[in-house]
Image (cartoon, grey):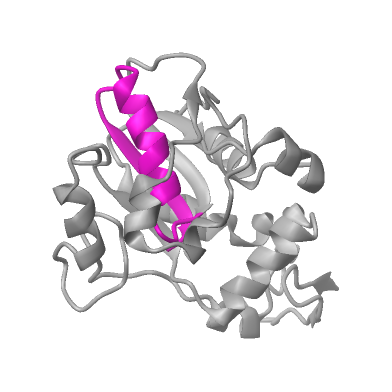
Amino acid sequence: MNICYLCDQSIVPTITWENFFHLPIKQTLCEDCKDKLPLLISPFCRRCGRKQEAETLCTDCAKWESHPDYEDVLKWNRAVFTYSPFMQDFITKWKFRGDYIVIDALFSYLLSAFRHAFDGMSHATLVPIPLTKERQHQRAFNQADVLAKQIEKRTNHAVMPVLSRPSVTSSKQSKKSRKERMETANPFSLDQPLQTPAILVDDIYTTGMTIHHAAKTLKDGGCPEVYSFTLIR
């Protein structure tokens, strides 16, 4: 009997004539959890991927584009799921409890969304958003690095951790106003310039500050184009 990775409940396999004479496929999610997954489908903002009623530029992205420091640093972001209480519980379980194996339960969704978003871009390099050394020590793993390496295993994209994050920022970006976020010092540094397009990888796109800072660092270092891919938007 399989156990659901997200709710820890037993999964009773459904027996049909199609699978009766074959070995059962290992199931990682129960049907209740599958039904709760908030898959991100169009329409959404054509730049950041936020769910909205039309595929136009959202107000936040319009402000990013009007800022002289961030104009055109990011081509677009695509995500797999929208943010919800269910996904908040998942992030807590995965990121803060160190139970990162649960990402296996969602990987078929993640891989499908990634291939759809970046079809024909096999030359692009995956760049995971780094943690500070302090945060890395606390969690014992980097969730963005886990996502990037899982994608690398099943695609032609290579992972290159070319960004560093040497210090802890003073406060969470989500607690700041938009103006304060835009004026926050860039926490990233570039260890190695990239001459290929880059796809930043992170677990969640919230305010957009982290992604824009990282994208600007790559662009300032000579990267021709920067995209991003996140598990949640």
- Quarter occupied by the N terminus: bottom right
**Vertical arrangement, residue 188 with respect to residue 229, above or below:** above
- State yes or no: residue 187 in magenta: no
Viewer-side residue, 111 vs 81: 81
The span picked out in magenta is 204-233
Q: How many numbered dots are placed on residues in this image? A: 0
Residue 22 in view: no
* Displayed quadrant of residue 205: bottom left
- Residue drawn at x 75%, y 62% is 23
Residue 4 appears at what percent x and percent y? 75, 73
* Displayed quadrant of residue 80: bottom left
Viewer-side residue, 142 vs 166: 166
**Vertical arrangement, residue 211 with respect to residue 181, above or below:** above
- Residue drawn at x 30%, y 41% is 119
Residue 109 in view: yes
Residue 5 shown left or right of residue 175 in the figure: right
Viewer-side residue, 225 vs 103: 225
Residue 77 shown left or right of residue 167 in the figure: left
**Vertical arrangement, residue 220 with respect to residue 131, above or below:** above
Residue 134 shown left or right of residue 221 in the figure: right
- Residue drawn at x 53%, y 40% is 151
Residue 133 shown left or right of residue 199 in the figure: right
- Quarter occupied by the C terminus: bottom left
Residue 51 appears at what percent x and percent y? 31, 72
Residue 167 appears at what percent x and percent y? 62, 34
- State yes or no: residue 222 in magenta: yes
- Residue drawn at x 67%, y 42% is 142
* Displayed quadrant of residue 197: top left
